[in-house]
Amino acid sequence: MSIPKIAYCPGTLAKGFTTYSQNCLNRVFEGRKVSHVLPYDPPAESEEVAEKFQENRKRISISGVQEKLSMVLEKNKLRLTEEGEQGTYILKPIPRDLKKVDQIPANEHLTMQIARQVFGIHTAENALIFFNNGEPAYITKRFDVKEDGSKLGLEDFASLAGKTSEMDGDEYKYNYNYEEIGELIRRYVPAYRVELEKYFQMVVFNYLFSNGDAHLKNFSLLETPNGDYTLSPSYDLINTRIHVNDRDFALDGGMFKDVFESEEVKTNGRVGLHDFQEFGRRLGIMETRMARLLKPFRQQQDLVETLIQRSFLNPETKHFYLNEYLFRCGQLNKT
């Protein structure tokens, strides 16, 4: 494997760049001229490198199955954190034990860029980056670490729902439904009306882009400078259908806390517009406002296809990603 030829910014996917654009550097790397190539080989390349990464894994305190490594930006270079040092970036190399694992970094990067650029969803800042041998990794800037290194309060919805592996088993983060997450937002967020609309958009987005891993730990509340809480920037957005044959929703209960089924579900087993309209009603969103929120998701967005074609996915995966989006967009237009 070698460093791929770059024609689009590996951060924003803007055309005409052979490395990170200034816009990406400003958003992700504090305006510093950071290289899109890391000063490391992948962990599997040598024992010495593997040992460094193994030590780093012990220090990062972020949950999840995928391997995550802690990094800091020192002058213009990214490096692994040392013992006792607070990381400000999370690096996610290619994981193991999934179909098309080599596509995962580009998949997550693309999905996060679509969320922000096309649908205006507030996401964690992110980019694609490459090891010395050209192997890709996904890098994201931590939003819970302040400039002075102190941390903001961050509570995921597994914690807010009182779900733990000890009490609820290994699948605890999937044992819930999206309607009840809405109830938790009402309980814990002072400006819950605004945040419920953002949450509604996230649930629709996750369906539209086949994110079957939007479980309780992939939604969080973040402390504000005033000391109250709002929804954190979105993170871990990925088209899981590329890698596993999963269901439409990560949570076992689906959208609703009861057995509601639209005619679309009863007829062909697929969710559609009426399911999301009912979901919005249960969140307390007014009909006119809901129609406005749903509109961009129901329209076929040209920028989605543009970003897919500019992404670092291989041609076969680009084709699959686009077809999944078009199919689900069609589902949202069945009335």
Image (cartoon, rainbow, N blue to C red):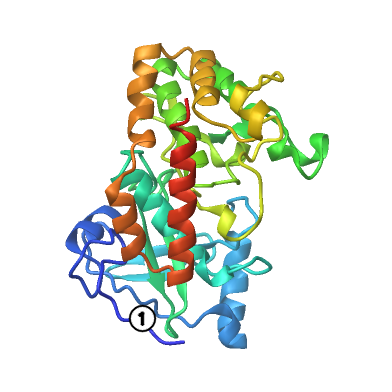
Q: Is residue 153 visible?
A: no
Q: Give the left or right position of residue 112, taking residue 83 as reference.
A: left
Task: Give how far across and how far down residue 174 sits, in percent.
Answer: 70, 38
> Total marks drawn?
1
| Residue at the spot 28% in from the left edge and 50% down from the top edge | 303
Foreground: 150 or 178? 178
Instruction: Tell me residue 63's x, y (percent).
Output: 62, 50
Q: Is residue 115 above or below residue 287?
A: below
Q: Is residue 17 left or right of residue 330?
A: left
Could you tell me if residue 34 is visible in this image?
A: yes
Identify whether 246 is placed above or below 16.
above
Q: Which of these two is toward me, 143 or 66?
A: 66
Which residue is located at x 76 percent, y 42 percent?
Answer: 171
Q: Residue at x 42, y 52 (%)?
A: 111
Q: Mark 1: which secondary structure?
A: loop
Q: Position of residue 44 (x, y in %)?
A: 60, 82
State which quadrant residue 228 falls in: top left
Q: Is residue 112 or residue 205 the one in the foreground?
A: 205
Q: Residues within 10 Å of mark 1 (few under 14, many from 20)?
A: few
Residue drawn where x is 45% and y is 85% of the image: 133
Which percent across, then down, holds residue 306?
29, 57
Amino acid type, callout 1: Pro
The quadrant in which residue 5 appears is bottom left
Q: Is residue 27 above or below residue 123?
A: below
Q: Nearer the viewer, residue 60 or 242?
A: 242
Q: From the viewer's perspective, is 263 left or right of 127?
A: right
Where does label 1 land, which residue? 4
